[in-house]
Amino acid sequence: MTPPPTLYERIGGHDGLHLLLRRFYADVRQHHEIGPIFAAHIEDWPAHLEKIAGFWSGLTGGPALYGGGMAARHIPLRLEEPHFQAWLGLWHRHCEAHLPAKEAAEMIAIAESIGQRLRAITGAHR
């Protein structure tokens, strides 16, 4: 029996994930609240998107391409609740606009879980 396709496969694999992330981060970069944070810390957007895609690939059942340290990289950013809300709000919108409902819900649930962990980790270091 063939295993069911992974979330990674259902969102279009590498190409589908990259398309979602390019669209999403185009809006993030223009957002009045979180755009300046990214602008201050990301110099090479293609490399950053590749790194983020590697992170999401592993989370969705695709190849595990991310080396780790995601939470620690966010500590110096001094993120607060409005930043998390802005990022997650944009993520919700893009997932719902560009993915089938089931896959959008799964991607949103993963992001919400990551957000909760980051809130706890960054909050502990304030």
Image (cartoon, rainbow, N blue to C red):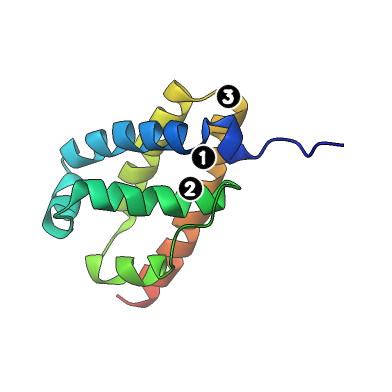
Residue 111: % across, % down: 48, 47
Instruction: Determine which residue is flagged by label 1.
Output: 108
Rendered image quadrant of residue 24: top left
Name above or below for residue 16 compared with residue 63. Answer: above
Pointer 2: residues within 10 angstroms few (<14), some, or many (20+)?
some
In this rendering, does residue 93 appear at all?
Answer: yes
Q: What residue type is labelled 1?
A: Ile
Looking at marks 3 and 1 on the same chain, the residue that comes earlier in the sequence is marked by: 3
Q: Do the residues labelled 1 and 2 touch (CB within 8 Å)?
A: yes
Q: Is mark 2 on a helix, strand or loop?
A: helix
What residue lies at 52% left-to-right and 30% top-to-bottom? 12
The single residue placed furthest to the right in the displayed view is: 1
Residue 14: % across, % down: 46, 38
Q: What residue type is labelled 3?
A: Ala
* Separation of residues labelled 2 and 3 (CA atoms): 15 Å
Looking at marks 2 and 3 on the same chain, the residue that comes earlier in the sequence is marked by: 3
Residue 66: % across, % down: 44, 60
Q: What element carries label 1?
A: helix
* Separation of residues labelled 3 and 1 (CA atoms): 10 Å
Q: In this view, does 115 lie to the left or right of 100?
A: left
Q: Which amino acid does label 2 sit on?
A: Ala
Q: Nearer the viewer, residue 69 or 4?
A: 4
Instruction: Determine which residue is flagged by label 2.
Output: 111
Q: In which quarter of the image is the N terminus?
A: top right
Instruction: Determine which residue is flagged by label 3.
Output: 101
Q: Is residue 71 left or right of residue 82?
A: right
What residue lies at 41% left-to-right and 62% top-to-bottom? 119
Q: Is mark 3 on a helix, strand or loop?
A: helix
Q: Nearer the viewer, residue 104 or 32?
A: 104
